[in-house]
Amino acid sequence: MSLINGLPAHVLLVHIVVVLIPLTALALAAAAVWPRAARRLGPLLPLLALVTLASVPLTTQAGEWLERHVDDNALVRRHTELGDGLLPWALGLFVLAVVVWWAHRHASAEPGQGSGRRWSALPVRIAVGLLSLAIAAGAVVDVYRIGDSGAKAAWHDGYSKTATGPKRES
């Protein structure tokens, strides 16, 4: 995908990633540490994480197309390098979302049905919770760093610090 309605697709798709990564991270963190949130989110959590995961390579591919169509400079290269590192974070969000959903689903099963008691063990819940919080925080920080570098690459010399257009009357 290269253009959407005449605009570089990356410029539009990036908004999906910027919204979905933090939203998925927040949902994962809530579900991992708060059983009521996990129950309320249910299968929506892994579904959201799957959509988030799928949006990352689409946006990255569109960004690689855009990179070939803009002037080459250090800011663009830095943004591209950072952007290439987001997929593992999105994959981590997805895997942990599935684990949290599955663990909660089986923990709430009747004691005689399957291995639910094993997953409700406190040490496992603590480990999954801590890992979920770490991956969620890492993903959000990475999206921030990528977005900041992309804004710098796009706008570093594309505007004037003083107003240059016609004055508006109030």
Image (cartoon, helix red, strand yellow):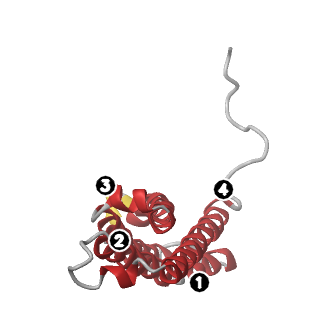
Labels 3 and 1: the sequence-earlier one = 3
Q: Nearer the viewer, mark 2 or mark 1?
A: 2
Q: Amino acid at mark 4?
A: Gly
Labels 4 and 1: the sequence-earlier one = 1
Q: State the residue lying farthest toward the top.
A: 170
Q: Callout 1 environment at 10 Å: few (<14), some (14 to 19), or many (20+)?
A: few
Measured as percent of width and height from the top left, residue 66 is found at: 46, 72
Q: Which mark is residue 81?
A: 1
Counting labels gives: 4
Splitting the image into 4 quarters, where does residue 37 fall? bottom left
- Compute the Cα span from label 4 to label 1: 22 Å
- Compute the Cα span from label 3 to label 4: 22 Å
- Please, what secondary structure does the residue beneath circle 1 have? helix
Q: Which mark is residue 5?
A: 3
- Give the residue at mark 2: 104
- Give the residue at mark 4: 158
Question: Is 112 left or right of 142, judged from the image as shown?
Answer: left
Q: Report if the CB atoms under discs 4 and 1 are less than 8 Å apart.
A: no
